[in-house]
Each structure stands twice: as C-alpha cells, then as structure tokens.
Amino acid sequence: MSTAHVAVFDYESGNVHSAVKALVAAGADVELTRDRDRALAADGLVVPGVGAFAAVHEALRAHGGDEIIDRRLAGGRPVLGICVGMQVMFERGLERGQNTEGLGEWPGTVTELEAPVLPHMGWNTVEPGEGSVLFRGLEHERFYFVHSFAAKEWELDVIPPFPKPAVTYATHGERFIAAVENGPLSATQFHPEKSGDAGIRLLRNWVESL
C-alpha cells in the first residue's frame, strides 16, 4: 500500500510545524502548503488553528481555505480540523460578545465553557463515539487540550443510508465535543500533535483510513 500524501494547510494560524512533524511520525508523506491545487490534490488535508474563532475564520477565508474545504468534502476527500480548525467547521462562534459566522459544515454554535478554571489546559480523558476510527485502540488514553471555547451539542441529523457520525465528548466544567468523525470530515478539539504517543497513534488511525 502506498504512503498517504497529506497536505497541512498553511494559512498563518496554528501549530503547522508541530502538525507536520506529528503526521510524519504517524507514517504520512507530508507537505506544508497554501497552494490551492496542492491542497485539493492531497489524499488528506489537515487544517490546524489556534487563537480566536474570528481571526482563524478570517485567515482561512483570506487564503481560500473555505472553498478548498468545501470542494474536498463535496468530492468525499478527507479533511481533519484541529483545535480552532475544528471550531470553525460549525455554523457560528460566540466569543467575548462577538458573534462570528463559521464555515457551516456542521450546525451549532461554539461558546465559552462553563468551568471554574479557564482555559481548559492540560491532559484529559475522552468518551469515544460509537464506531470511532480515530480512537481505535485509544479508548482509555488522555489527550492534550488548550481552549476556553467549544461546541457542546451535536445538532446534525444524519439520514440513512449515510453513516451515523462518531461524536466524542470530554468534560471540563461541563460536557463538550472533543472530536467528530462525519464522513470525510473529522476534527479534534484537542491537539493530537501535543498529545505524545496517543496523539501520534490517533493521527496514524486517520492516515491509514485515507
């Protein structure tokens, strides 16, 4: 079996070099690119993101990432969002009074966690969704989170014959969505590239599914 070619989308947001290094460790052939054709042609596209929802969304649109993601998903081509790269897949982000439109790949709003301590920073366990591929063999592992905002409810009704999404939850003050696997679009709220061996294994599970 040939090595999967993965493009990490470089739109000036996110731990792109850490993501590249982790994906190489996971067995992928990786390139860092902002070129539209290269991003469309890759077997898998990774969209990292750190910082404010509005800033990440604006940077993504400025580099044509919204259209690239749309086109890939329309053709069933895998995309993996990380941290705020997951959050912007939802319809809206409500952050410090600013209501920002997201990419709208999934319904729902990203809001601040109700927790005694923010940000949620450090290692946490997750509750993998039924049928998860990403968390295969990793059901009891811990992953590294750094965030104050999250999507909390899964609102997409998927009608058969389309497969039911695997929605993974974690808890910090309240329950929130830690990862989603929905057809070609997957995403994690935590940072697999900062999650040690468990994160590499999760990325390997994704790479091997391409």
Image: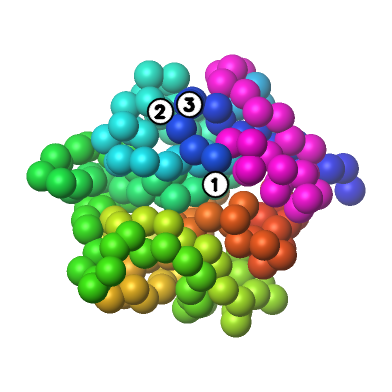
- Position of 110 compared to 131: left or right? left
Residue tagged by mark 2?
60
The first of marks 2 and 3 along the sequence is: 3
Q: Which residue is mark 3?
A: 12
Residue sticking out furthest to the right = 1
Residue type at numbered disc 1 = Leu
Chain part drawn in magenta: 16-37
Q: Earlier in the sequence, mark 3 or mark 1?
A: 3
Query: Is residue 152 something one can see in this rendering?
Result: no
Percent x, y of residue 167: 44, 68
Disc 2 to disc 3: CB gap under 8 Å: no
Q: Residue at x 48, y 73 (%)?
A: 124
- Residue 92 is one of the magenta-drawn residues: no
The secondary structure type at the circle numbered 2 is: helix
- Residue 80 is marked as 1
Percent x, y of residue 8 = 61, 34
Q: 200 or 66: nearer the eye?
A: 200
Contact between marks 1 and 2 (CB within 8 A): the answer is: no
Q: In this rendering, is residue 58 above or below 45?
A: above
Label 3 environment density (alpha carbons within 10 Å; few <14, some 14–19, many ≥20): some
